[in-house]
Image (cartoon, grey):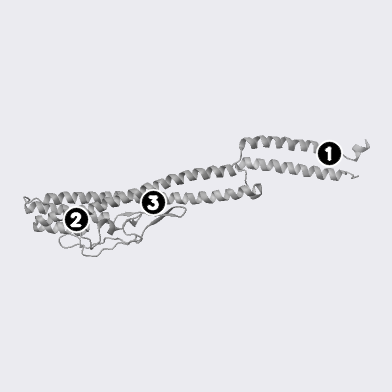
């Protein structure tokens, strides 16, 4: 038969007290931090899921930033294309006005001055920047695409071959999802060899106005119309991409809510349950101390009595 000594009782008492104190401390730690997993040993399986959710939330946050940047870029491109369309529309109105044979040369000269101002505006538009990046020069966004020199008559020297960079600006907007969001200047304003190259068309209109050649002015209406159709098609493409990116925004937002909810279920403490549990553990610990005080206070003198 095993003989129970005072040392054995004291050791067991301290062991139980430490266990109760540790349990109470763990509960209070969860209450203080608001997390039920404060170290891997608290829940080895749960910590695995928690780390996975954290990684996915981090990736989702970066995708969301990319999508926001893509929306800004697309919206700005649409604004700039709208401005270019307004210039072309105004050029068309002036061209129709100048095509009337009753206009004296002085009227044509006045129209020509306005045409040259519109060309200035168009060059500014073609060199538009967003956050210091030229939006119409592909991956060479640090290089000014339309750096024309001026002719003596005030027009730009469009005989210079302007070849904008065809590289695509890709934004990663999801897991394995890349989206090109830019348009090149040659796509929008025309290649140097295109008959409806917008800058060349304006120069031809200006030359015809200067010489009073009404038929030559009228002949440029077709080029203006085809270029306007190109700009409208480009805006349509931008609009379609914007719609897709906005759908990605909604999808990423929903995913963020779902991942946050899953993370909360895995990590967050149950305050109501923990408060009740903490009170019970506190009572148990106090009871252990009370009983322990009686056990430890027993001495040889008590047995002699």
* Mark positioned earlier in the residue sequence (3 or 1): 3
* CA–CA distance in space, label 3 to label 1: 73 Å
Q: Position of residue 130 (x, y in %)?
A: 34, 53
Residue lying at 37% horizontally and 49% vertically, measured from the top left: 71
Q: Is residue 305 above or below residue 101?
A: above
In front: label 1 or label 2: 2
In the image, which disc is placed on residue 295? 1
* Residue 120 visible, this orientation: yes
Quarter of the image that includes the N terminus: top right
Query: Is 83 displayed left or right of 271 in the figure?
Result: left
Q: With 56 as the anchor, is 144 left or right in this view?
A: left
Instruction: Determine crowd level at label 3: few under 14, some 14-19, many 20+ residues with C-alpha closer than 10 A.
Output: many
Q: For mark 2, what is the residue?
A: 223
Identify residue for label 3.
Answer: 70
| Residue 273 or residue 187, whichever sits in front | 187
Q: State whether residue 297 is above or below residue 172.
A: above
> Looking at the image, which residue is at 27% across and 49% down?
82
Q: Residue at x 23, y 48 (%)?
A: 86
Crowdedness of circle 2 by 10 Å Cα count: few (<14), some, many (20+)?
some
């Amino acid at each position: 038969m095993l003989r129970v000594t005072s040392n054995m009782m004291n050791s067991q008492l301290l062991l139980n007290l430490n266990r109760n104190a540790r349990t109470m401390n763990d509960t209070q730690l969860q209450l203080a931090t608001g997390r039920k997993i404060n170290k891997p040993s608290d829940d080895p399986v749960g910590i695995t899921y928690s780390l996975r959710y954290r990684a996915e939330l981090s990736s989702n946050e970066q995708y969301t930033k990319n999508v926001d940047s893509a929306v800004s870029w697309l919206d700005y491109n649409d604004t700039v294309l709208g401005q270019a369309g307004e210039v072309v529309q105004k050029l068309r109105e002036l061209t129709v006005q100048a095509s009337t044979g009753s206009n004296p040369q002085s009227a044509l000269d006045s129209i020509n001055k306005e045409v040259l101002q519109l060309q200035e505006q168009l060059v500014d538009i073609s060199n538009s920047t967003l956050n210091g990046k030229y939006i119409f020069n592909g991956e060479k966004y640090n290089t000014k695409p339309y750096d024309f020199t001026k002719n003596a008559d005030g027009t730009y020297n469009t005989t210079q071959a302007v070849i904008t960079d065809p590289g695509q600006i890709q934004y990663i907007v999801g897991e394995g999802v890349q989206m090109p969001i830019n348009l090149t200047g040659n796509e929008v304003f025309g290649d140097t060899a295109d008959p409806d190259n917008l800058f060349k068309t304006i120069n031809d209109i200006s030359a015809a106005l200067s010489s009073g050649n009404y038929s030559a002015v009228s002949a440029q209406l077709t080029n203006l119309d085809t270029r306007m159709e190109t700009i409208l098609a480009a805006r349509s493409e931008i609009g379609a991409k914007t719609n897709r990116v906005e759908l990605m925004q909604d999808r990423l937002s929903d995913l963020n809510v779902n991942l946050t909810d899953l993370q909360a279920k895995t990590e967050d403490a149950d305050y109501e349950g923990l408060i009740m549990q903490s009170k019970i553990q506190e009572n148990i610990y106090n009871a252990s101390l009370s009983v322990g005080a009686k056990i430890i206070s027993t001495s040889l003198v008590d047995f002699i009595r």
